[in-house]
Every structure is written in structure tokens, then in C-alpha cells.
Amino acid sequence: MVREHIGLCALILVMVLACASPVAAESLAIYGSTAGFIPDLHADRFSVAYNFPAPSGHQLDRNVADVTGPSIQVIFIGGDDSFSGETAGVIEQAVWDGKILVVSHPATGKFGDSLPFSGTGVAPGTEYMEVADPESQVSQAVFAGLSSRFNATAPAEERLSVIGKPGTATVLKYSTGEPALAYRKYGGGYVIGWTLEDPSVYLGSADADAVLSRLVIALLDSREGTVTVTATPTPTPTPTAPPATETTTAPTTIATTIVPTTSATATPATTGNVIIHSSPMGATVFLDGLYRGETPVELSGVPAGFHSLKMSMEGRYDYDGSVTAVAGETVTAFGSLPKQEPYIISEGTPVPSTSTPSGSGSENPLSSPVVIGGAITAVIGAIVTIYTQKTKKP
């Protein structure tokens, strides 16, 4: 009886603890950095399932099947690009199937057509970045209570020099007008891209987390086409004495419609176009193992779906990656081919030459002492044989 009571009490305790524990709606996989997103501040919505520190690209390579598993909804890749191009291709396919990818420089170099921007070089940081389209519903929701301009608080690190692809929504831009933060629909999911590694240099840690978390949640909720972003504006300090009547700032809820980037056509296309660039240009391109020219090259009629991409150039390491062709659209792929370090060959024991000595090439081979000696021996042997046969008795 006592044991039964103890077992019943233990069962009730487990049920109470289970009910009291928060259950996260989405699981996260993180490699390197989260580009400003702070998971601990959003434990009510997210839980971290995988977290690989950088640089440990080999760990990501070995566990990419788990990182892209059914339970993972958001993948963060940043701060390092030591993982393989094949791993990047698996992640891109997972995004195509409906996941959210947040990727920041320099890890952006391993991804191709899924990125919301394209470019081939780096540039120094600018004095500030600002909201690209303050009047848009997305910007009003994401930046509610925040500034529309963010000055660099430290010497800005290098950034990518890029242009947005068709269908890309630029959220933040540099003073030069180039995208700093942008997103683009990719298949059934979205890719959010930062063109620098650490946005807190401009936004600070609190605002960087607020902007990215609101955008991620908005895109997660956009699977039905309508996004509801709830943002609590930051109270504005009052320089004078506080008013007699206390006011309360209510949360701002803005319904935002995410417009699909893929336009509908009467007859669905089954192929698309792929533009391939490399750094440096002039690399040999192989798509699915077939030679397709040299970069820059534009391929038309590429079947929609996943394709392996390889680029090679003499004196440089190969680029092994992937590209996903989109029916009825043109996608851009880019790969970098680092220069190979020259091999240093140490001096060893000289190898005797097997070539014919100088001046002997035109001589008659019959004049060689070896050949003459062999011929004389053969003649003597033949004479002895004939003489022996003649001296035999019948």
C-alpha cells in the first residue's frame, strides 16, 4: 500500500512538472554565431537543439542530417566557413523544403542561389546603416519602437559588397545603399542574410536581437501568407516633469502580408536559368558532372531542382557546391577558388640519366662493342656446332 502511494505521488509530481515546464514551438540549430539573435531571451518560443562552435566545420559536416532534421525549424550559420560545400547544399535543400536559414558573412561564401543577394568582393564598413523602406508594413512591425538609423559604435569590420536579387526584400541598408540585412523566399522557406559578421557593431546587442527575432518569427508565421508581428515600442524619455495622468503603451500588432516572390504562370515551367560566377573568373564549370563552359556562364533550360556544381582552375583549389534551379526563374550561383600554395621540392640524390649520351644518337648501332661482341660469339658457336656434326660417326 505504501509503495502504491509513493508511486502515485511520483506520477503526479512528474505530471505537474511537465505542465509547468515551457514547451518551445520551434527548435534551433546553430553553427558559429547567430548574428545578434539571443536564444535565451526567447525560450518561450525557441529551444536550441544543436549548437556547434566555430571553427568546427567537420562537426557540422558529420551532423548535417540532424541539423536539417524534421524537428529543426530555424538554422543559424555564421562566423566561419570551414564546413564543406556539400553541407551547404544539404542545408539549402532543407530551406527549399520549408525551413528558415539565417546566414552571415563569411559563411555566405559557401551558399549560392539561395542567398538574397549576390556579389564578388568585400568592402570596408560604412558610418551607419538605416531602414531600407520605413513605410513598408514589415519595417513598421520589425522596427516598432526602434530607431530608423544605426551608427557604427566601433571601427566597422569588412562587409560584403552586394546587390539584391529579384524578389529580395532589403530590411537594412548601408549609407551606400547596398543591402546589410535582406531576406528572400526560397522554395517553401526563407533565407535571411547579413552581409557582415556582427551587426551589433551598428545596432548594439539589444536592438540586433529585437530586429532579427521579430523578422524570424514573422517569416515562420508567414507560411499561410499573413504575418502578425507583436512589438512593444520602447518608451520615449520625457524631458519635463511626468504628466498627472499615467499612460500605458499598448503592444503594437501589425498584420503584414508577405508577397510570394514566385509569380504564377498559366503553364507551369519545368526548367529555369542558372547564372554562374566565380572568383576569379574563367573557371571551368561542371554541372552534374558535365562540362558547361567557363565563368561567367549562363545556362538555360536547367531542370528545376537540386544540381551538383563544381568549378576548377589551374593553380587553385576546386569549388564543390550545389545550385537549385527554380522553374521559370533565373538564379545565380557563386563560388570562390582559393589559390593553391606552391609545393617546395627538396634536393635529393641525383638520379642517373637514362638518355642516350650526346653525339651517340646518329651512330650505327652495329658499331657498339656490345653488339659486335655478341655477334662474334654467335658466329663461333655456329661454327663449332657444324664441325661437331660433321665429325660424328655414322
Image (tube, helix red, strand yellow):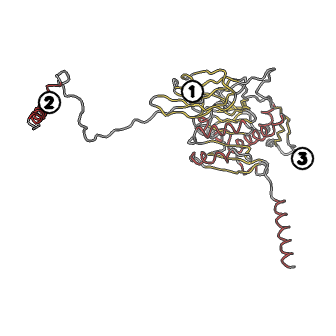
Residue 272: image quadrant is: top right
Nearer-the-camera pick, 130 or 122? 122
Q: Residue furthest right?
A: 245
Residue 214 drawn above or below residue 372 = below
Q: Gap between marks 2 and 1, in whole Å? A: 59 Å
Residue 269 drawn above or below residue 203 = above
Judging by the rendered image, the residue that carries numbered circle 1 is 290
Nearer-the-camera pick, 354 or 153? 354
Left or right side of 232 for 305: left
Estimate the x, y position of residue 326 in percent, counting from the top left.
Answer: 70, 27
Q: What kind of element bears circle 3? A: loop
Estimate the x, y position of residue 210 in percent, counting from the top left.
Answer: 74, 42
Which quarter of the rendered picture does the N terminus lie within?
bottom right
Left or right side of 361 for 230: right
Judging by the rendered image, the residue that carries numbered circle 2 is 375
First reached walking from the N terminus: tag 2 or tag 1:
1
Question: In the rendered structure, which amino acid carries the disc numbered 3?
Answer: Glu
| Residue at image point 64% right, 26% down | 332
Estimate the x, y position of residue 211 in percent, counting from the top left.
Answer: 73, 39
Judging by the rendered image, the residue that carries numbered circle 3 is 246
Residue 335: image quadrant is: top right
Q: What kind of element bears circle 1? A: strand
